[in-house]
Image (cartoon, rainbow, N blue to C red):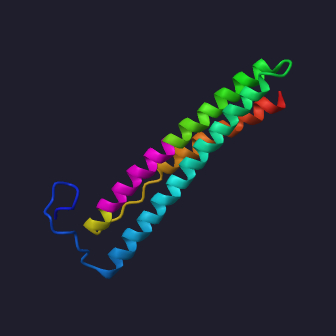
Amino acid sequence: MKLPGNGGSAEPYRPTRDAEVREHLANERTLLAWVRTGVGLISVGFVVERAGALAAGTPGGQETALVSEIFGLALVALGCLTLVVGAMQFFRNRRMIIAGVFAAMSTPYMVIVAGSLLLAGAFIVYTVL
């Protein structure tokens, strides 16, 4: 079964079951949620990083600027990781839908959750101290 865009035939892929169309559409919506989350994390990361630049101009703001830059870049990195993981999940799920199988895999989600919790914990420790 050759897919368009993968060196397959010029003939478009036609799902064999009606439910398969709905599954592909749900998979695309899930990808869009991953993209929305990743872009949101990247955007917040840029805002946090830029806030540090503003703080650098205040008395004693150099330390705040450095920490803000670190947190901002970490958020941007987590957002990029989210985009990569989301794309990998999309293609993995696409292959499984076509094959008519499904194997749940929580590891990609746990990577993003762990990264988010790590950043949140570091931010809490920083603000408390």
Q: Position of residue 45 (x, y in %)?
A: 63, 38
- Determine if the magenta segment contains residue 90: yes
Q: Left of 25 or right of it: where is 42?
A: right
Question: What is the x, y in percent for residue 8?
Answer: 15, 59
Residue at 52% x, 59% y: name it.
Answer: 33
The span picked out in magenta is 81-95
Examine the rendered structure and indicate whether residue 103 appears above or below residue 85: below
Q: Residue furthest right?
A: 59
Name the main secondary structure of what is drawn in magenta.
Answer: helix
The reply, left or right, for residue 126 in relation to residue 73 is right
Q: Quadrant of residue 128?
A: top right
Residue 34 to residue 42: above or below: below
Q: Residue at x 60, y 31 (%)?
A: 73
Above or below: residue 81 compared with residue 52: below
Question: Who is closer to the viewer here, 66 or 55?
Answer: 55
Report if residue 54 lies within the magenta region.
Answer: no
Residue projecting furthest to the bottom? 18
| In this rendering, position of residue 97 left or right of residue 66 | left
Residue projecting furthest to the left = 9
Quarter occupied by the C terminus = top right
Q: Quadrant of the N terminus?
A: bottom left
Q: Is residue 108 visible?
A: yes
Q: Which of 101 and 62 lies nearest the eye of the viewer?
A: 62
Q: Is residue 118 visible?
A: no
User: Which of the 4 image quadrants contains residue 70?
Assistant: top right
Q: Residue at x 16, y 54 (%)?
A: 7
